[in-house]
Image (spheres, rainbow, N blue to C red):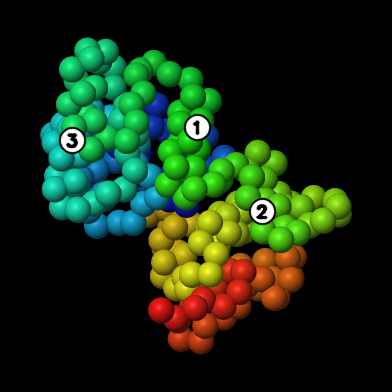
Amino acid sequence: MRILLVEDDADLSASLKSELERIGFAVDVALDGERGEYLGMTETYTLVILDLGLPVLPGLAVLTTWRQAGNNVPVIVLTARDAWYEKVDGFKAGADDYLGKPFHIEELVARIQALLKRFYGQSITELSYLNLRLSEEQQCMFIDDQPPLVLTAVEFRLLRYLMLHPGQVLTKTHLLEHIYDIDHDPDSNVIEVYINRLRQKIGKHLISTRRGQGYVFGGQAECP
């Protein structure tokens, strides 16, 4: 799952990026509104964290542009301002949640999890399918009553994304966009490598291949 963080405070951006990556997200950072607006229009994100007080282009203008263009990515707005009418303006522009500065990272993470739960209809902190359980907190998976299987960061992000989209055909390109940040440019074959690693750990039957199309988690996708 890939997040866009648009925040001009370089120290805050670095600490947030580090923490969000630690819990299993790929994170792109923009330090001004113009860059943030561009990334939000040209890249694919699961969620955006958007500061309002940005240089070059204010966050509210960025959000308005996205929504007018039909970009409905979930957005959590960050702001040091506490005027109630500014929050109203943010929600009218299309914000999904609001968090005032200063804040604790634990609250931001909780809001991200709550927003994604609304979006996906299930908690992302602990996913389950048949006898398989994936824990975000422990960054590992459990099969029946066996000891936990530790996953690498990429394996965890890939499996979590697959489990959030059961029965859907997911192309290599789509998967790459959601498990790596913009600073990484891996070869598309890397997905095959990690798919094979996951199959060895959870069983080949849970991830099937659609030749020339991509991969399906949890059974074959049905044609409409």
Q: Residue 74's spot in the image, x, y percent?
A: 34, 43
- State how many labels appear: 3
Q: Can I make out residue 101 in this image?
A: yes
Please determine whether, in this image, residue 169 is positioned above or below residue 105. Answer: below
Rendered image: mark on residue 128? 2
Q: Amino acid at mark 2?
A: Ser
Q: Residue 215's spot in the image, x, y percent?
A: 53, 75
CA separation in Å, label 1 and label 3? 23 Å
Q: Secondary structure at mark 3?
A: helix
Question: What residue would you read off at disc 1?
Answer: 109
Please determine whether, in this image, residue 143 is positioned above or below residue 80. Answer: below
Q: Earlier in the sequence, mark 2 or mark 3?
A: 3
Few, some or many residues within 10 Å of mark 3 (<14, 14–19, 20+): some
Question: What residue would you read off at disc 3?
Answer: 93
- Say whether residue 217 is left or right of residue 198: left
* Residue lying furthest bottom: 211
Q: Earlier in the sequence, mark 1 or mark 3?
A: 3
- Say whether residue 91 is left or right of residue 106: left
Q: Residue 143's spot in the image, x, y percent?
A: 78, 57
